[in-house]
Amino acid sequence: MRASHIWHTLQEGNRRYSSGLSPEWAAGGSEPPHRPLAVVVACSDARVPAEAVFDQPPGSLFVVRVAGHVLEPAALASVRFAVEILRAEAVVVLGHTACGAVRAALSTDPVRGLEAIVEPIRHRLERAGGSETLDERSAVETNVRQTAREVISHLDEVLSPDLARPEVRPAVCDVATGVVEWIE
């Protein structure tokens, strides 16, 4: 697909959205409220758009997307902002099947230029007992659980004691079916 076609597709999609011709995402002619039900810390994989996966309209989710849901400082600050300022009461850490970032972390081949994504995931897997015996699905679930623990730890450190803590839950979306499994 040529870049000119991509730009045209995006512009036409925005035209439909902003004019209300896309009913599930209609802008409605006024600024939508920014009162998210939840924060979704998700992978940047285009096959797992949080608003579509959870069938939520604009303004209802505060989505933080980074490959492998790696929590670099700006991502952590974004989660804090949503909880502290916007008063989001829940945080979903959403992983997914067929995750390229997790596959790269499991690979024994060096991944040049992707260390900022791969190394935190490898560290999470090692902290949970190592990646040598994990299959891909188990590694995805482990990465999601460990990320949820990191979110909880960060919020405990930065939020004032009088602010209610959000519930943080890990989940995995199956990219083939769209079904989200909540991980305990």
Image (spheres, grey):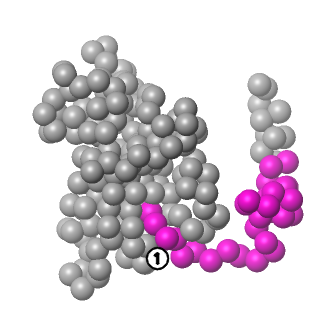
Q: Position of residue 26 (x, y in %)?
A: 77, 64
Query: Label 1: which residue?
Result: 86
- Viewer can see residue 73: no
111 up-or-down from 141: above or below: above
Total marks shown come to 1
Q: Is residue 184 rendered to the left or right of residue 129?
A: right
Q: From what the image shows, is residue 42 above or below residue 104?
A: below
Displayed quadrant of residue 104: top left
Q: Quadrant of residue 51?
A: bottom right
Q: Position of residue 172 (x, y in %)?
A: 41, 43
Taking the magenta stretch, the answer to whether it contains residue 137 is: no
Say whether residue 25 is magenta: yes
Helix, strand or loop at label 1? It is: loop
Residue 103 horizontal/vertical position (percent):
37, 25
Quarter of the figure with residue 24: bottom right
Q: Is residue 23 visible?
A: yes
Amino acid type of disc 1?
Leu
Residue drawn at the location 71% of the way across and 76% of the way down: 31
The residue positioned 43% from the left and 73% from the top of the image is: 88
- In this picture, which residue range is highlighted in magenta? 12-39
Question: Which quadrant of the figure contains the N terminus?
Answer: top right
Q: Please report the residue visible at 77 percent of the width from the left and 35 percent of the height from the top.
A: 6
Residue drawn at x 81%, y 57% is 22
Q: Is residue 11 left or right of residue 169?
A: right
In the image, 110 versus 161, the foreground residue is 161
